[in-house]
Amino acid sequence: MRRVALICAYNEEKNIVRVVKETKKEVERVIVVDDGSRDKTYDKLKKLKGKDITVISYQPNRGKGYATKVGLEEFLNGSGDVLITLDADGQHDPTQIESLSELVESGASDVVIGSRYSRRGVDKFPPIRVFFNVIVNIVVLLVTGQFFADVSSGYRAYSRDVIKSVGKKLNVVDFGIEPEILRLCVDNNYRIATVPVSCSYETGRKPNFVRLASGYMNFAFKYKGEIIRRLFKVGR
């Protein structure tokens, strides 16, 4: 099966070339969406453009959700069977693409989440990241009725059918994109699996936690009715 990787980047001039090159070793095609970077990310990406590396860039910065939707549309315009999403900052190990993809390729699952909290070393993760992940995990549990160990993980594998069905329904432009995709997958009865992956926070720029929090809050507010309904149901 043909694997395609989607990488959304914003101000990642220090890591983007290495991440793309290492990812290309594991897949047949790489799609990179430069989400309005203000540094030299796009300048470096232009040198990588080729038959199997597609680079899309625009201004201004519009958010991870918007960039992801642009990448999903590009994926559907091609012939890929499995889409793997990963971050541009180098925190994900591209050599683990195989473990995410194989469950989709075998037909055992429709979506695979790479969980950063399923391996040893969780205690080394920045506390604020753990805090955000716990909160968004609880929110998604209340919205969907299902628990996932790492809702905010951007390291995932999807079947083409999932992208066809879910991609056109996405209307999120911020960091709420990951929980929103899971919600849609649950609503459409797609099979979702989790595999452990390693993660490094020693590379890349520090995330904007204000934007992260805003994206998750927007998601929670959007589905506040469902959250309240489940809370009252649990309290009975």
Image (cartoon, rainbow, N blue to C red):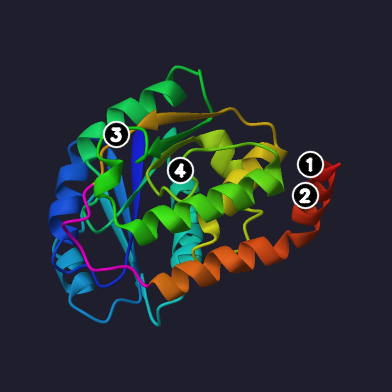
Q: Is residue 7 above or below residue 147?
A: below
Label 1 to label 2, Cα distance in Å? 5 Å
Q: Disc 4 residue type? A: Asp
Q: Residues within 10 Å of mark 1 (few under 14, many from 20)?
A: few
Between 6 and 134, which is closer to the camera in this rendering?
Answer: 134
Q: Are marks 1 and 2 in contact (CB under 8 Å)?
A: yes
Q: Earlier in the sequence, mark 3 or mark 2?
A: 3
The residue segment tinted magenta is: 200-208
Label 4 to label 3, Cα distance in Å? 17 Å
Query: Which image quadrant for residue 64?
Result: bottom left
Q: Earlier in the sequence, mark 4 or mark 3?
A: 3
Q: Residues within 10 Å of mark 2 (few under 14, many from 20)?
A: few
Residue at the spot of label 4: 150
Q: Residues within 10 Å of mark 4 (few under 14, many from 20)?
A: many
Q: Is residue 53 magenta?
A: no
Secondary element type, mark 2: helix
Label 2 to label 4, Cα distance in Å? 21 Å
Q: Disc 3 residue type? A: Ile
Q: Main secondary structure of the magenta part?
A: loop
Q: Which residue sits at x=37%, y=44%? A: 155
Q: Which mark is residue 231?
A: 2
Residue at the spot of label 1: 234
Which of label 1 and label 3 is nearer to you?
A: 1
Q: Are marks 1 and 4 in contact (CB under 8 Å)?
A: no
Secondary element type, mark 4: loop
Q: Residues within 10 Å of mark 3 (few under 14, many from 20)?
A: many
